[in-house]
Image: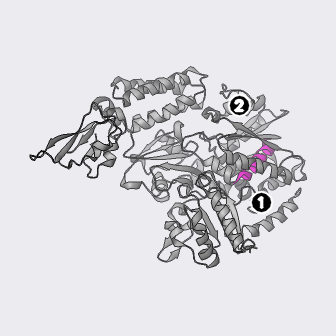
Amino acid sequence: MKTLQDLAEIREKMRKEVALRTDDEAASKYDKQILVCGGTGCTSSGSMKVIEKLESELAANNLTDKIQIVKTGCFGLCALGPIMIVYPEGTFYSKVEVNEIPRIVKEHLIGGNPVKEFLYEETVTDEGIKPLTETAFYKKQHRLALRNCGVVNPECIEEYIGRQGYEALGKVLTTMSQDEVIQTILDSGLRGRGGGGFPTGMKWRLAKNLVPDADMKYVCCNADEGDPGAFMDRSILEGDPHVVLEAMTIAGYAIGAKQGYIYVRAEYPIAVDRLRIAIQQAREAGMLGQNIFGTGFSFDIDLRLGAGAFVCGEETALMTSIEGNRGEPRPRPPFPAEKGLFNKPTILNNVETYANIPQIILNGAEWYASMGKDNSKGTKVFALGGKIHNTGLVEVPMGTTLREIIEEIGGGIPNGKKFKAAQAGGPSGGCIPAEHYDVSVDYDSLAKIGCMIGSGGLIVLDETDCMVDIAKFFLQFTMDESCGKCTPCRIGTKRLYEILDKITSGKGEPEDLDKLEELCQYIKANSLCGLGQTAPNPVLSTLRFFRDEYIAHIVDKKCPAGVCKELLSFVIDQDKCIGCGLCAKQCPAEAITRTDYTPEGHKLASMAIDTTKCVKCGACVSKCKFGAISKK
């Protein structure tokens, strides 16, 4: 495939092949298609065994020519894996087990009657079975960066082409100048989705113009996603790797680069394998390499694996690592657009940012800018986790409120608990408290309350979470991940952690709050790179919105949420206790004893806890059938 005509012919052929899974009316040669999630979450739950069983059952029933099995990327509802969708019906099977496959094949694929008890419960109604797109989880989403995830086979370039793949690259190379490409990205309002939110088009323009006579320029992709609870970039790479290759090639044309590098952490084996397959396929198809589409433009992409250092998410540290050195940040200026990888002009964007590029080129800047709010255009992918019903991957227009994301898409807080806060942006972000539940999720609105979108991790917390402990958790992470190059980050984060540990251990003093704030401001102002500059954010935001919890830990020596072990005490309510002794049998420290007997001298009346022996494991609470034991 060397020409646009070749590309168009394959697109038309493959458009029919993916018709059953889309709104396209073209006819497919298959009667049905079964899409099975092959992302990390579903794979770990056994989706490959489900595929193997499906293959054997279809073969045994002579259905191989009529029904196609497609291994896709993530559908989004990660907690329900393994996931399987049968088209054209769109029936959604969740938590599929291998022993369920024969019945699904017999009753559904042959008999035409979906097995309702195996379906995702929210798709089963009194009126019948509704498609996944009409469920609460999907209804308010707008999947742009995720448009192909869960739709195409990520290891098949032809299926990507069937969904307009590489059409944007053809348009750019044959009808647009470099400046026109950059202006389109500028006009779209696309900002970097890696955390900083810098205008993408401005970054590209700087790299093109600052050193116009450079003999070499580079395009880099940051796939070193390291935030706790974040898996947006991984899911795009696993479900739609070609979109990143196409976008990087477009970026290479725009700035005049000939070489690209994708820096991906080695802990993402599925993403790495699919990237390697995609790169090889793109080279063989003429989408990468020399003289692409016969236009004279040449561009290639290579992988570089990272060892999982969080600091390598910082652009200069990432480039230093690609060069073969220890991943440490460099002082700026000069910025990468002037001196980046190998001291040559370089642009670096993350996976999600690149995933938007082809659609912006095909549909225009105005189309993209029509989505979102104010200076936050387009959509944003979030990894929902923590205390929420629907754990998974969601993509919503910028400006969607936090309440909509958590209550409507996420399904709310389980177990009847109340929403307390959401940690946005991971270790670099801050917490959004319940008083800002209706905040618009966009760059400017979150910045006004001292938070940030970050790369897109969104961890939901309820009333059983201790905010001091949450700040301590993220501080420990950044302390461990500091490269150690600059003193404010290397030593400052350690001192911060020590103060937080002191407070959660019941040894805090009132002046510790002033020390925390002073140290936070010093670290932010003097650290070399973004890791240190943003490390204090979880502490500052919890101090701002949950100062009363800090005071309770310091003054009252109590943890209101009952999380900090050193501040806990377990108490037996004598009015509820019947003296059954089950708690005493469960106690590993033999801290629970009998307190008195009935006049007859043989019937146990109540129990008591010896606080000097209690190790605060909580085993007694979980075993008491009468709710007589509580932690205070």
Residue 341 sits in quarter: top right
Extent of the magenta region: 240-257
- Seen in the picture, residue 169 relative to 332 is either above or below; the reply is below
Q: Which residue is mark 2?
A: 321
Q: Is residue 183 visible?
A: no
Disc 1 crowd, CA 10 A, few/some/many (<14, 14-19, 20+): many
Seen as rendered, the residue at the extreme left is 599
Q: Secondary structure at mark 1?
A: helix
Residue 49 sits in quarter: bottom right
Magenta residues, dominant SS class: helix
Q: Which residue is mark 1?
A: 161
Q: Nearer the viewer, residue 523 or 40?
A: 40
Q: Is residue 112 visible?
A: yes
- Residue drawn at x 32%, y 29% as measured from the top left: 554
Q: Let me know if residue 252 is in the magenta part.
A: yes
- Seen in the picture, residue 473 relative to 490 is either above or below; the reply is below
Residue 54 in the image: state x and y as whole percent. 66, 66
Residue 273 in the image: state x and y as whole percent. 72, 47
- Residue drawn at x 61%, y 22% as measured from the top left: 485
**What residue type is disc 2 on?**
Ser
**What residue type is disc 1 on?**
Ile
Can you say which quadrant of the picture contains the N terminus? bottom right
- Residue drawn at x 65%, y 73% as measured from the top left: 88
- Seen in the picture, residue 166 relative to 489 is either above or below; the reply is below
State which mark lies toward you, 2 or 1. 2
Q: Nearer the viewer, residue 520 or 90?
A: 90
Q: Let me know if residue 538 is in the magenta part.
A: no
Residue 347 in the image: state x and y as whole percent. 73, 38
Q: Secondary structure at mark 2?
A: helix
- Residue drawn at x 69%, y 63% as measured from the top left: 70
